[in-house]
Image (cartoon, coloured by chain):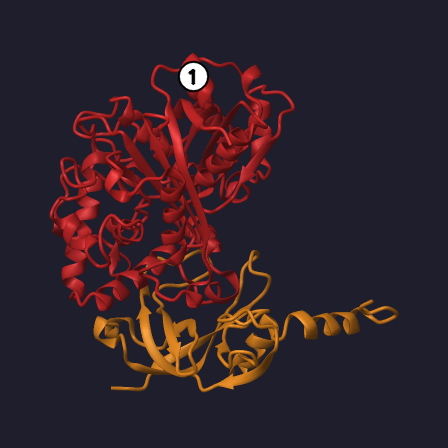
Amino acid sequence: MRDVAIIGIGHTKFGRAAKSSLELFSEAALQAMDDAGVTGKEIEALFQGAALPGFEEAQVMPAAFSAAELNLGPIPATRYEGACASASVAIRDAVMWVASGDFDMVLAGGVEKALSMGTAFATRTFAMSCHSPTEGPVGLTFPGVFAMAARRYAVEYGIPLDELREKMAYVSMKNHKHGALNPLAQFYKKMGELKVEDVLNARMVADPLTLLDCCPFSDGAAALVLCAAEDARRYSDAPVYVLGTGQASGSALSKMEDITKPVSRVQSARMAFKHARLEPKDINLLEIHDCFTIAELIALECMGFFGWGEAANATANGETDIGGKIPTNMSGGLIGKGHPIGATGASQVYWIVKQMRGEAAKGNQVDPVPEYGMTDTLGGDFGTLCHLILGRDRR
Amino acid sequence: MVGVGKTQEEIEKELAKQYIPLSYAEYEEALSNGKLMGLKCLSCNKITCHPMPVCQWCSGRDMERVELSGEGELLTFTVIRVAPESFEAPYIPCLVKTKEGPNVIGRLELEPEQASQALIGKRVKMSGTYTYKGDKFSGGAHVCPVFKIVEP
């Protein structure tokens, strides 16, 4: 298997888009192709994450039409659907195909127009990635799943719920602080100076999670150009290499042994570390799936950056902020930057690459530039997990 | 060969016996009659609930239908304040560890104002069912168990 590099990146403004999904994806894809200095003729396949296009714009099979919009010719173009992890799964498969030698250069990314659906319909369609037979009739929602996890987390680690809520608030404060500095973020220049009380006293969505414990619904797209590592320097002075990938699947919520320690997240992260021959201590920067404040804490623990039950205190102590032990979500994360679900994994990679090029916004840029970065993307209630480890050197 | 010369209904029954020991439709019908049905594995003796085609613990294929007590312990819950289209907030999803072993998801019969963290760990018992009327995506109406706190 060959090594694979990222040579071009593209990212639309996240928020409410007037453009169609096809236009959003085209915008991100053309940015990525311009960034790599390649034309459509060189792209041999398209791997596109898109979770709910049928509900958003009555469009299934969006990947084929995206390839057509870009005049890429009759190349293979496939939509990947792993709920909120759709783009990461698409990127992972794109890496596999280039690594195998079947393709030399491909386009991968994702797109979503979730904000345009409105809250009630978006909540309904997002909930479709819960286990339909058992969680469907209950009316479980995504905030609901993570609210249940937060209550369980408090019990497991003997933390009074009010105290845990205060610590969770630090995730929102940190991610909004960095989102407010990111010009492509949904909440750019907004909510950059939240206080604990603001998070605690916001409107309750699913007890104990308030609106400010939750990421928003978003429209947006992000895309990458990937090629064989041996060719990367022909296109880019600063290619970023995919050093390891992991993917794992979960079950219905009721079949999970412990919803605060999802096996799928642990397994996927371990697979990526093993593949990259790295450990958590080697990683300088994380973009992780903070769909809810509690989700960031659970992710940090599952990936091995903190012991079980330790991420809440670590976050409140600033260990996951810039200058801390492991800067996490310096783009603003899903909470501050927005979460167009099918695009999120590609956006996470985009911001790691930006950091590695030293091009993140002032106040978000990690110094010195990170050598190793890692993404964590979660689909459904722990149904699809995907991790990517990126590095500035091939190793 | 399975089902040669038989009606569709007979073929479905035959395949179900072999591959789907308790269907969701049968599970929901039992719920509607106040019964929480599961499957007992003849290999590891553990209980699977909600139903699966294989034992949720050991993947065993030989399972027989059993009725669960409906009793258990409240593992966690939330009060949904922002509901999806076709649902009406507030309501309380909950996760229950049944006396027989498997966890079951359902709703908690409780006033939202009374929902506090202190309820976690309390004993609960199935007290009925909630019927979701369904929408154009759900393939009709569906049923889930409802639990109530029995330990003060």
Quarter of the image with the N terminus of chain B is: bottom right
Say which residue appears at 29% left-offset and 33% top-offset: A372
Q: Is residue A45 above or below residue B69?
A: above
Q: Position of residue B60 (x, y in %)?
A: 57, 72
Chain (orange): B
Query: In screen coordinates, is A220 left or right of A70?
Result: left
Type of amino acid under label 1 = Ala
Query: In screen coordinates, is A155 left or right of B8?
Result: left
Say which residue appears at 69% left-offset and 75% top-offset: B17
The mark tally for this picture is 1
Mark 1, chain letter?
Answer: A
Q: Please tell me whether mark 1 sits on a helix, a strand or a loop.
A: helix
Chain (red): A
Q: Is residue B71 above or below residue A369?
A: below
Q: Position of residue A125 (x, y in %)?
A: 47, 51
One can see residue A178 in this view: yes
Q: Which residue is mark 1?
A: A36
Q: Is residue A346 above or below residue B78?
A: above
Q: Around disc 1, counting alpha carbons within 10 Å, would you say few (fewer than 14), some (14 to 19), or many (20 or more)?
A: many
One can see residue A201 in this view: no
Quarter of the image with the C terminus of chain B is: bottom left
Q: Is residue A232 above or below residue B61?
A: above
Q: Nearer the viewer, residue B18 or A174?
A: B18
